[in-house]
Amino acid sequence: MDWSNERRRDALAADYVLGLLQGRALARFERRMQEDTDLQRRVWALRERLDPLLQGEPREPSAAVWQRIEQELGWAPKRRPWAWFERLSLAAAVFALVAAIGLGVYVQTRPSTPPSGRMLAVLHNTDKRQVLRVNLAADGRGVTVVALHPLTVPKGRSLELWALPKKGAPIAVGLLNPKPGQIQHYPLHAAVAELGGFAVSVEPPGGSPKPVPTGPIVYQGVAIS
């Protein structure tokens, strides 16, 4: 793959942030990003622009909204067999316009540099959906975690966050609050330069009874330095 192509790098960064990369393509991009600081900056810049939009829960417009749109466009008031197709076309056009504006702003603006001394990891679930964002404090002594979507916690269990060193065993960080949008702070007792990523496991109430995960890993992501 030609990583020197500017448009290609922008497109891949956008696909990564939007969760469109899967399988080998996702693994290949994350490996490249670990050693490519310019690619990290592109991902960071795009996330900063799109995060406010991605954190909202999708909502289906009501029938009244569609009716008002039809009236504004001068469509006939009576229902037609193909009305659903016209509404779908309008929705697709609006979505395409929003996406074009968002990506246009990103492409026209050079990627901003991540704040000094910070690391960002976005954790995905098994469906490659972004669910958690982890920031490293500037002093390197802790992390802040924000859930981008409600976290699924099995009944009678808890979710525990782990720091994953590039070498050695996982390091427990703390239990997660499943509610989206709430910033959670945790101390971090690990060598930042040696962190490869973060993961979340399902554990008994109060966390793992051992110094390593005992339950399945449900979310994980690589660290971007």
Image (cartoon, rainbow, N blue to C red):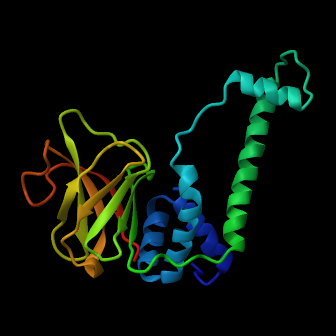
Residue at the limit of the structure toward the top, as seen here: 78
Residue 44 screen position, x and y as percent: 51, 70
In the image, what residue occupies the spot 82% across and 24% down? 82
Give whichever of 131, 140 is nearer the camera: 140
**212 displayed left or right of 133:** left
| Up-down relation of residue 94 to residue 67 (above or below) | below
Residue drawn where x is 41% and y is 77% of the image: 34
Residue 217 percent coordinates (x, y): 26, 52
As drawn, 9 above or below 215: below
Residue 150, position in %: x, y?
Answer: 39, 41
The vertical placement of 95 against 224, above or below, is: above
Figure quadrant of residue 5? bottom right
Q: Considering only vertical position in the picture, is 60 above or below 212?
A: above
Task: Pick the quarter of the image with the C terminus.
Answer: bottom left
Q: Residue at x 27, y 49 (%)?
A: 176
* Residue situated in front as seen by the camera: 30 or 39: 39
Which residue sits furthest left? 209
1 relative position to 97: left or right: left
User: Which of the image's four quarters has the N terminus?
Assistant: bottom right
Answer with left or right where residue 77 lies relative to residue 190.
Answer: right
Indicate the quadrant where residue 132 lies: bottom left
User: Left or right of 49: which side holds 119?
Assistant: left
Q: Nearer the viewer, residue 57 or 21?
A: 57
Exactly how many numbered labels are in the figure?
0
Q: Position of residue 32 (x, y in %)?
A: 46, 77
